[in-house]
Image: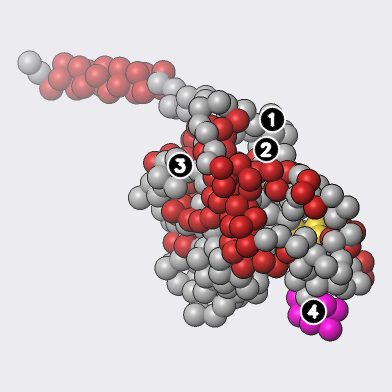
Amino acid sequence: MNKIKITGILALLMLTIVTINACKKDPVEEPDEPYTLDIGTFPTPNLPADNPLTREGVKLGRMLFYEKKLSGTNTQSCSSCHMQQFAFSDTAALSIGVRGMHGKRQAMSVSNMAWNSNEFFWDGRAHLLRDQSLKPIQDALEMDETLDNVVAKLQADETYRNQFRKAFGTETITSELMSKAMEQFMLTIVSKSSKFDDYKAGKATLTPEEERGRFLFFTEYNPGFPAQSGADCQHCHGGANFENDAFMNNGLDADADFIDIGREGVTGLASDRARFKVPSLRNVAITAPYMHDGRFKTLEQVVGHYNLVRNSSTLDPSFQQQLPNGLQLSPQDRAALVAFLKTLTDKDLTTNPVYSSPF
């Protein structure tokens, strides 16, 4: 075979390869699948229309929730202060940040955020859950990092570039997309499987003490008829999620003892002084310590507080009617309330692998 013929064959082969490659299309990302939220008997939540839950978006949010690169020292993640085994709350009165400093308030649980419709944090300073997700990163007392640095760290990681592409169709990582992913994951953390839920479904029976606690919890305070009077808890902790999305002064301190002005720091209104967000009571037995400053270590102390609150200029009217003598609950009734509150503990949430670290 002469050189001219060999050259011709090679040229034809190269032309064929080029033609085949030219006909190949860039790989197309499969459309992301919607993520179905299991809400049990809860009402349908009002989820953000501009950030629909998707399988890959939730997966990315879960990765970021447990990612220590979000902190300035690469040693702390969101999950460090929102631990699954404690219903995504912290056991410290004031969480300790990456520089060893304490935060300003107790870390709230981030379960059942899908039913949160009135701002986030104790003082409501974040309007959307995605806004909330970024603030601890930038807080010098908490994760002490900048969003630009976090983006740079994630952008340098091929795994994250690929996951952002799968979730949002781009490998260009931004803090906005980070926040949307974390919002998606937190919206999927649902607590709905407690003994009380089973009781309502006819699958469990409350003990006599738990039943007495249930009566007290859901019955209004009525000093004129002591035998029929309850603790009136449901006005603040009602509905499927045992909360009311309101900001209230619940009688922790008198005016002279106010240290944290709460909601007033956000709204600038004196009428909001010492008012804080009413949290859900689901899993309350495993989310100690309690209140915005973690001052109470036990449920017994919490019930003791509500038995006789302290008066102040912004005390919510629902507590005013109980003054000056308080609820006057007997020791047995206080114990019954605690027994009932323990029926709100979710038997699956703390071990569900769907919410655990993906690493």
Q: Residue at x 15, y 20 (%)?
A: 6
Q: Nearer the viewer, residue 284 or 180?
A: 284
Callouts 1 and 2 close, C-beta under 8 Å? yes
- Helix or strand or loop: what does disc 4 sit on? loop
Q: Is residue 1 visible?
A: yes
Residue 14 position in % (x across, y down): 27, 23
Please state the extent of the stretch shown in magenta in the rendering: 254-264
Is residue 341 located in the magenta-colored stretch of the structure?
A: no
Q: Main secondary structure of the magenta part?
A: loop
Identify which amino acid the numbered label 3 is placed on.
Lys
Looking at the image, residue 151 lies above or below residue 289: above
Separation (CA) of disc 3 from disc 2: 17 Å
Q: Residue at x 68, y 54 (%)?
A: 279
Q: Nearer the viewer, residue 135 or 249?
A: 249
Residue at label 1? Answer: 43
Residue at label 4? Answer: 258
Q: Is residue 283 visible?
A: no
- Image quadrant containing the N terminus: top left
Identify which amino acid the numbered label 4 is placed on.
Phe
Residue at label 2? Answer: 240
Residue at label 3? Answer: 347
- Of labels 3 and 4, earlier in sequence is 4
Q: Residue at x 69, y 29 (%)?
A: 44
